[in-house]
Amino acid sequence: MSRTSDEEGGSPERDEASADEQAQFSALLEDSAEDLYERAPCGYLSTQLDGRIAKVNTTLLDWLGYEPGELVGHKHFSDLLTVGGRLYHETHFAPLLRMQGEISGIALELKAANGARLPVLVTSTVKTSSDGQPLLIRTTVFDARDRRAYETELLRARQQAEEERARLQRLNTTLQKTLLPPALANVPGLDVSAHYHIASTDEVGGDFYDLFPLAAGTWGLFLGDVCGKGAMAAAVTSLARYTLRAAAVYDPDPAAVLDNLNTVLNHEYNGTDPRFCTVVFGLLTPDHDEGGFRVTLASGGHPPALLMRADGTADYLTTPGGQLIGVLPDVDIATTTVRLAPGDTLLLHTDGLTEAHINSDAEDGERYGDDALLDFADALAPTTASDTISAIRDLLDKLGSGVDDDTAVLAIHVPQPPSDEHQ
Amino acid sequence: MTPDLTLRTRTTPAGAVIELAGELDHHTADQVRAALPGLDLHSGQQLVLDLDGITLFDSSGVTVLIAARNHARAADASIALASVPNCVSRIFRRVGLEQVFTTHPTAQAAEAAWRPPSS
């Protein structure tokens, strides 16, 4: 309908429209209270105090498929409920209504004449006489089928999301395992142990380690930490692991191995999405002259290794100046060489341990730190590889949710010769 | 939700300045990365990252600073950090980056230290 002439007051069209409105308004005024009760968009029900139905409106009768005579005077409100609903009515609804005089928005299920179930929201009030004596109970009943369908749908979506999450966590855990060696190489004359602590199964972490044979009588080992989490970090971790092993075969000099890794990562990930890792690479050779092993460690920006000696002392093997691997075209790599005498234990770790929050409540609180780890190692020495790893696992348990990043630890220990054991 | 990181960029004769405040970690790193291509940065200029308001910094923050360095280099510009807080310098020392970035006590000092390329 065109309304362009509306601006001009008194036009015939305008008069017609206002007459229509008047007629509609009059009709509203003439809506009888009786009809409003009978055909309201909700069910009405009045019962005696014992629940016997005294009055019920047409809307509710239609919903349930009853004739007026079937309910009034014959049935109680609780007769309209399902078994579970009746129990709830007896134990909660009715007592609360008696105590409070009203109860609202209770979800119940009504049973229709044909046995169908109708989810509803029920509100009841007790009508009292002028001197406060309870007379009857008035109840309104709202159709909750749409709401129930919505809730069922929400529940289904939530269950599906939980299943997906569980599936993702299983996938992450599997992926994590493929980034770690299934078993560490057995080195004659060396006791080896390692542990990987997963901080969250929601995302794959980027820590890695390995110990593997090189040319006869030499062994390579590494432990590192790729920046970031998730699939991209896992891809870098995988590349780093295989590059380190391949580079060590080509040239086992630890600084050269890390230099090679730096070149590979820097070529692969430059520009706006640089990826780096920090890593310690070690070359192990048995010391045939003095016993034990010699180990040369090269560090690319990684936390220093800890040496726990047979005499009960502990120190960091610092490699100052070593730089993170993968983002600078030329990196400085620092190396140090140490002899592992019988009874000595060497521990490599990632900073998930030292960066752990001591007070897990505080988001930005104090960290566990390098000094605390040195004290821990000092108290532990002399020790073995497996005892070190189990002590670290206890420590991680104690730090609990304060450990918010993955942590990898690798310990190697030169056992005392059997003849020295009693000294 | 309040933003974990606030980022402001401004342009000086010496080059673009990015002021960062709040938490620079794996949740917010992409925000800084996304701001790099839109910078007004020319050959011979200096990109300054003012870290005065940084309260939390992790390894993802390191990758962002490296990305900024790569971006500056691609534009034939230099990069400098200003007002480096302890949480950043601690990680820099740890991963051996303390010699890689030129640092200044303030963004003003960084601007004052810049010299136009001699032609």
Image: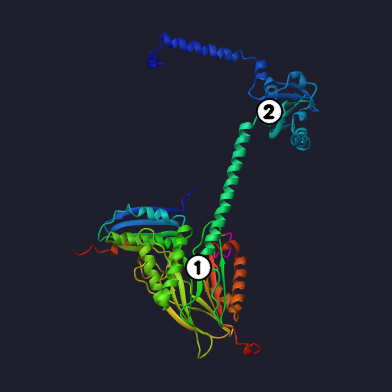
Q: Residues within 10 Å of mark 1 (few under 14, many from 20)?
A: many
The residue lying at 46 percent from left, 12 percent from top is A17
Do the residues indicated by labels 1 and 2 lie within the same chain of the protein?
yes
Q: Position of residue A242 (x, y in %)?
A: 45, 68
Residue at disc 1, secondary structure: strand
Quadrant hosting residue A73: top right
Q: Secondary structure at mark 2?
A: strand
Circle count: 2
Residue that mark 1 sits on: A208
Q: Identify the residue at image location x=64%, y=14%.
A: A32
Q: Nearer the viewer, mark 1 or mark 2?
A: 1
Q: Which chain letter goes with mark 2? A: A
Mark 2, residue position: A141
Instruction: Find the residue positioned furthest to the top.
Output: A12
Magenta segment: A351-361
Q: Quadrant of residue A15?
A: top left
